[in-house]
């Protein structure tokens, strides 16, 4: 595994997700914990990916491998960004900063779509 886990400490911190540059609101979103919204259900596919169904909008999303991995972490209870990243690092051999960036992108996109609940 390329990440030295002894030198990387998992301290709980608030994470700031920059707002979309094209959005009318240019606020930054401070993320403490993330959870799937109550109106979102998920199912695993035969290819070990995940389908999310937004019952409020009647929309189904087929997730790629990395998004499926994030959702699998969120199916039990709300998680901090650091906890999500830590669990993904156990599954994927990737640098911590790369995994963190992917998780923050996921949080930004899926919260904007109304699929995630974020506490600050």
Image (cartoon, grey):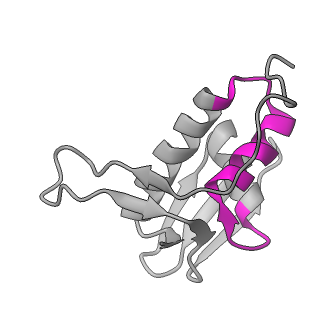
Residue 59 position within the rendered picture, expressed as x and y whole percent measured from the top left: 47, 67
Residue nearest the viewer, comparing 75 with 16: 16
Q: Exactly how many numbered labels are in the figure?
A: 0
Image location (x, y in percent) of residue 68: 69, 48
Q: Quadrant of residue 53?
A: bottom right
* Of 18 and 113, the residue lying toward us: 18
The picture quadrant where one finds residue 5 is top right
Say if residue 78 shows up in the picture: yes
Instruction: Give the side of residue 104 with respect to residue 63, left or right.
Output: left
Residue occupying the point 71% across, 64% down: 74
Q: Residue at x 68, y 30 (%)?
A: 96
* Residue depicted at x 50% and y 71%: 118
The residue located at (71%, 51%) in the rendering is 11
Residue 89 within the magenta-colored segment of the rendering: yes
Looking at this view, is 107 or 8 the one in front?
8
How far across and down, in percent of the image, does residue 37 sit?
56, 77
Asked if one can make out residue 49 in the rendered structure from this viewpoint, the answer is no
Judge by depth and name the residue closer to the eye, 61 or 31. Answer: 31
Q: Which residues are magenta?
A: 74-96
Q: Which residue is outermost to the left?
A: 24
């Amino acid at each position: 595994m390329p990440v030295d886990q002894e030198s990387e400490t998992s301290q709980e911190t608030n994470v700031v997700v920059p707002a979309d540059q094209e959005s009318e609101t240019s606020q930054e979103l401070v993320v403490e914990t993330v959870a799937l919204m109550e109106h979102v259900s998920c199912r695993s596919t035969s290819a070990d990916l995940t389908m999310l169904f937004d019952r409020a909008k009647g929309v189904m999303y087929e997730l790629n491998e990395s998004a499926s991995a994030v959702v699998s972490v969120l199916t039990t209870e709300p998680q901090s960004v650091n906890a999500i990243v830590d669990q993904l690092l156990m599954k994927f051999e990737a640098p911590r900063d790369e995994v963190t960036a992917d998780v923050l992108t996921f949080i930004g996109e899926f919260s904007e779509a109304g699929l995630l609940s974020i506490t600050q």
